[in-house]
Image (cartoon, grey):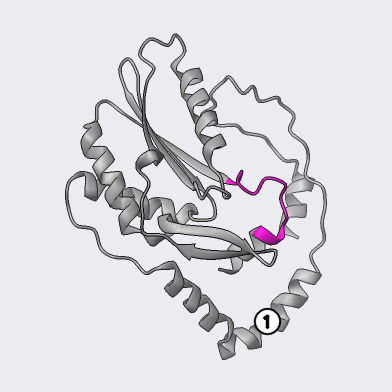
Amino acid sequence: TPIQQWYFNLGFSDPSYFLQSQTITIKSVDIAKLKNAFLRLVNHHPAFKVRFYKKNNRYVQSYNNVVDHSFFSIHNIKNEKNEQNAIHKIEIDLEKQISLTDNEFYKVAIIEGKTNSHVLIIIHHLIVDGVSWRILFEDLVQLYQEKTVLKTDTKSQWYQQLIDYSQNKKTLEALPFWKSTTEEIQEFNLIKDQFILYPNNTYGAVTDNLSLERTNLLSE
């Protein structure tokens, strides 16, 4: 898709490190049932089956219907003094396993704590975005409850829709306006953080205030 091509064109030194993750904390979970739900989820959505390889210095996308069960792991941290640190360490270790070269795009971990279980999901941004998470969670709940989920469009169908939209008459007519608008955008430096974030702490929220002058600059 265009956004995937944009990402590869950025030329990052480590293109594997572009991840999104979610952690769900629950009282108890049937691990075997949850693993089966994830396996069905991966088989249900074609995006989990994408593979990338280089050809003539360009990335080419393909699909592989074989699902490697190694994406799923179970961890016990009941004896850890600091569960948050233990969870963070597991997350770091799993993030390092995400690899475009090896076509490892997602990891799921069940982390069993003293009183709660934690479901950690890490997915490369090439196959997930903010909207996709909602769909995946809805489907996961349905599959965990052993219900049927609706089939979604494939990425190839989505890509074709983007091509059709880009060549639409109204889109082409509006293109000069948006190009001229983006050329008129003036850049300015945002203020830097006035606080230090410590990696071993957990923050529910971080807030800061802008002066009236700087707020007005954002609206210009």
Tell me which secondary structure the magenta stretch mostly adopts.
loop
What x and y, as percent, mark residue 99?
56, 45
Q: Is 17 covered by the magenta stretch?
A: yes
Region rendered in magenta: 8-18
Task: Say which residue label 1 marks.
Answer: 175
Please identify the quadrant where the C terminus is shown.
bottom right
Give the residue displayed 55% in from the left and 31% down from the top: 205
Question: Which one is nearer the viewer's eye here, 78 or 217?
Answer: 78
Say what secondary structure mark 1 lies in.
helix
Residue 32: give x, y in percent of width and height: 22, 35
Task: Check residue 68 for magenta coloring.
Answer: no
User: Dot 1, how many residues are within 10 Å of its Cα: few (below 14), some (14-19), or many (20+)?
Assistant: few
Residue 41, image x and y in percent?
31, 51
The three-letter code of the residue at mark 1 reads: Leu
Which residue is pictured at 68% across the width and 81% down the height?
175
128 left or right of 191 in image: left
The one nearer the camera, 168 or 6, is: 6
Give the left or right position of residue 193, taking residue 21 as reference: right
